[in-house]
Image: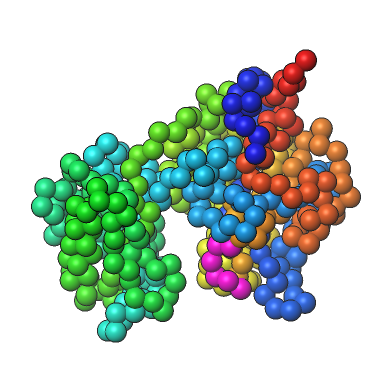
Amino acid sequence: MVRINVIQKLVYPTPSKIILLLIDGLGDIPSEEGGKTPLEAASIPNMDELTKKGICGLMDPISTGITPGSGPSHLALFGYDPFKYDIGRGVLEALGIGLGMTKKDVATRANFATINEEGIITDRRAGRISSEKCRELCELLQARIKSIDDVEIVIKPSKEHRFVVLFRGEGLSDRISDTDPQKDGHPPKEPKSLHTEAKKTEKIVTEFTKRSAELLKSHHPSNFVLLRGFAKYPDIPYMNKLFKIRPAAIATYPMYKGLARLVGMEIIECGETHKEEIKSLKENYPKYDFFYVHIKETDKAGEDGNFSSKTEVLEEVDRYIPEILKLKPECFVITGDHSTPCKLKSHSWHPNPLILYSQYCGADGVEKFCERECVKGGLGRLDATELMPLMLANALKLKKYGA
């Protein structure tokens, strides 16, 4: 990766604009032998046309062969070393719903889940219950579990089956293993301290899980709680200081707002639809010079193994490309944070296709935006941490290096 301290010396503020359209879980693999990926099956004439004018490639989320979580894959795209800034999911979820954290806090991302009589998780997402049901169940848990020993418990809903649990007290550590097995068909894991300093936290988390299960046992399919990504608030520099840009984020899901807040982006509030996201982009376009626009539903479809749904989302997003281009950004990028193949129903190590369009990028002969064609592109195969310098360069925000 390009050293961030080198970029800091080269970057300078300009009025030029960068738009990063992040299609979550974009990359895929054929679901059957000789078959197509969702990108290959989708009718996406606007993205295809953009490939003819821009330059394409494949991008590894953090490193070849490594399957990333959403946190590290996004940080890499924003120019941060994901191995240096190893940030737990709990902090991102907490910040995403606007939950303030103190130095005494440990936050964790939680799922309502379904567990059977044999103690096996049959659905890690409890059938993707509604956000209203999630709020109702969080209120139930909060009313009955306000503290454990000397530790305050804060429970707040996020979206659908997701919520946040914040443990607040002295002597807490985030060095705790997840209870979420990450796959259906397995029993939940016991929380384990990964260091002697986390013994107290292990005890509190174990008791919280036990009490929650007792309170939820009659609330099928949401009759269990899974916890992952225990984290304390990290020390991380803001993007405006690193890259001399005014960054803003447009996202519908709380965790991605949390990621954006963590690196100092302004959160532009929008509705729940892609149309409303693009409307917010257009309305706020004069105010900022870096826009991160997040599309979630492709990742959701991939995790559900729903090929047709993923294709439909891609086709819908494609219809908004002309509206984005009318804004005339100096640099426009379309890519994903990681692949979520429908065949695997989970994040994977596969690289993401990438289009970079600017008046300075040249062209490479690629005419279709998909995995098999982008491998032929002029950018080749690169790590996600290389994208930020490329965007800054194509927006003419970097000075010459050396004499």
Instruction: List x then y, in percent, for residue 167.
Output: 23, 49
The quadrant in which the C terminus is found is top right
Identify the residue at image location x=72%, y=30%. Answer: 393
Taking the image as drawn, is residue 158 in sight? no
Residue 27 appears left or right of 68: right
Reply yes or no: does residue 298 show up in magenta. no
Q: Residue at x 39, y 61 (%)?
A: 160
Residue nearer the viewer, 399 or 364: 399
Looking at this view, name the residue that lies furthest to the bottom: 118
Image coords of residue 235 (percent x, y): 40, 33
**344 lies left or right of 99:** right
> Which residue reaches farthest front?
196
Q: How is the image coloured?
A: rainbow
**Residue positioned 35% across, 39% down in the render:** 233
Chief SS of the magenta region = loop
User: Residue at position x 21%, y 76% from top?
Assistant: 218
- Vertical placement of residue 265 versus 155, above or below: above
Instruction: Determine the image quadrant of residue 121.
Output: bottom left
Which quarter of the figure has residue 124?
bottom left
Q: Is residue 17 visible?
A: yes
Magenta-colored span:
343-348
